């Protein structure tokens, strides 16, 4: 995910029934972002690129739940991931 010529990544976790909202579980720039993306791909986790959303999510603290105003945007990403997972 590229933001202003800088690689950034944010990883979210959502466990239905356990979490009330998705949480930020990893985030970073440049080499850390590359590592987050590489780990996701190694484990078969789909990667969705949305630089605007990553920029906003990167302002959250680790383990912080996403705020309600981001629910719709993150729900669209989760729907994408679920659809990709079903195809695999």
Image (cartoon, grey):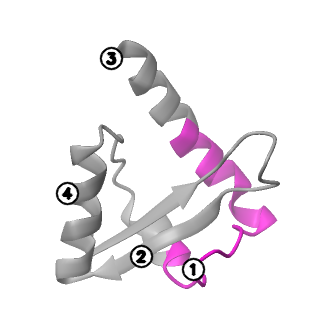
Measure the alpha-carbon separation of dots 3 and 2.
26 Å
Q: What quarter of the picture does the C terminus occupy?
A: top left
- 6, above or below 81, in the image: below
Along the line of sight, the residue nearer the viewer: 76 or 42:
42
Label 4's element?
Answer: helix
Pointer 4 with pointer 3, Cβ within 8 A = no
Along the line of sight, the residue nearer the viewer: 64 or 80:
64
Measure the alpha-carbon separation of dots 2 and 4.
13 Å
Q: Residues within 10 Å of mark 1 (few under 14, many from 20)?
A: some
Work out whether mark 1 precedes mark 3 in sequence or the reverse, and give the earlier one.
Answer: 1
Stretch of the chain drawn in magenta:
56-78
Measure the alpha-carbon separation of dots 4 and 3.
19 Å
Q: Is residue 16 magenta?
A: no
Measure the alpha-carbon separation of dots 1 and 3.
30 Å
Judge from the rendering whether residue 87 lies leftward or rightward of residue 60; answer left or right.
left
Work out whether mark 2 precedes mark 4 in sequence or the reverse, and give the earlier one.
Answer: 2
Percent from the top left, x then y, of residue 76?
Answer: 58, 41
Q: Which residue is mark 4?
A: 38
Q: Residue at x 45, y 16 (%)?
A: 86
Label 1's element?
Answer: loop
- 15, above or below 68, in the image: above
Q: What quarter of the picture does the N terminus occupy?
A: bottom left
Label 2's element?
Answer: strand
Label disc, if present, on residue 27 of the rendered structure: 2
Percent from the top left, x then y, of residue 14?
Answer: 64, 49
């Amino acid at each position: 995910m590229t933001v202003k010529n800088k690689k950034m990544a944010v990883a979210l976790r959502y466990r239905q029934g356990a979490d009330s909202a998705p949480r930020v579980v990893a985030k970073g720039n440049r080499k850390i972002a590359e590592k987050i993306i590489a780990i996701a791909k190694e484990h078969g986790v789909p990667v969705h690129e949305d630089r605007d959303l990553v920029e906003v999510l990167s302002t959250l603290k680790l383990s912080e739940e996403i705020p309600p105003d981001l629910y719709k945007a993150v729900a669209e990403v989760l729907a994408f991931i679920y659809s990709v997972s079903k195809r695999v």
